[in-house]
Image: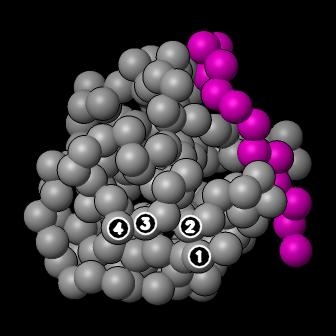
Amino acid sequence: MDAYCIRPVVEADLPLISRWRAHPHVVEWWGEPDVEPEVEELGDPNIDIWLVELAGRPFAFVQDYRVHAWDPHPFSYLPPASRGLDLFIGEADMVGVGHGQRFLRQHVEALFAQGVPAVGADPHPDNVRAQRAYEKAGFAIVSGPVETPWGRAVLMDRRA
């Protein structure tokens, strides 16, 4: 199994993430790069943002956040201290080859080791590739398509 370096994003990473956000395979599910820019999240105490590297090559972005910092939230049903999760693979040649499910599993296991009781994810209902990656990482669909403040989603979660 590949060992991924999942490290905190620093300001110097923002241009790379901005380039990824402009790639068509990312825009399709995340919207235009100026929607929820990462620079705003960098200082938010409710959100942790991460860069995923393999063999020293950055290729993906992950954010996890305190779901109970927003009220209401689609994951309000999760226990206190639960986290929500969003991610994308920025490098197109790394999409569709199994990295998503593997670094997702690694990151979630690290959250559980820190005492997080559950993690929620909300991929778009049409993003079957993301849903499969979450399922392979141990997530289960708990709600069919719903409308959230951030768009349509399928709610998925995984418990520690």
Mark 2 vs mark 4, foreground winner is: 4
Q: State the image quarter where residue 154 is shown.
A: bottom left
Residue 6 magenta: yes
| Magenta range | 1-13
Kindly identify which residue carries mark 2.
Answer: 118
Please tell me which of labels 1 and 4 falls first in the chain: 4
Query: For this rendering, which residue is in front, 64 or 9?
Result: 64
Magenta segment: does it hold 139? no
Q: Which numbered disc covers residue 77?
A: 4
Q: Are marks 3 and 4 in contact (CB under 8 Å)?
A: yes
Location of mark 3 (residue): 78
Q: Position of residue 52 (x, y in %)?
A: 70, 46
Residue 3 sits in which quadrant? bottom right
Residue 30: in sight, yes or no? yes
| Secondary structure type for disc 2 | strand
User: Along the polypeptide, which appears first: circle 1 or circle 3?
Assistant: 3
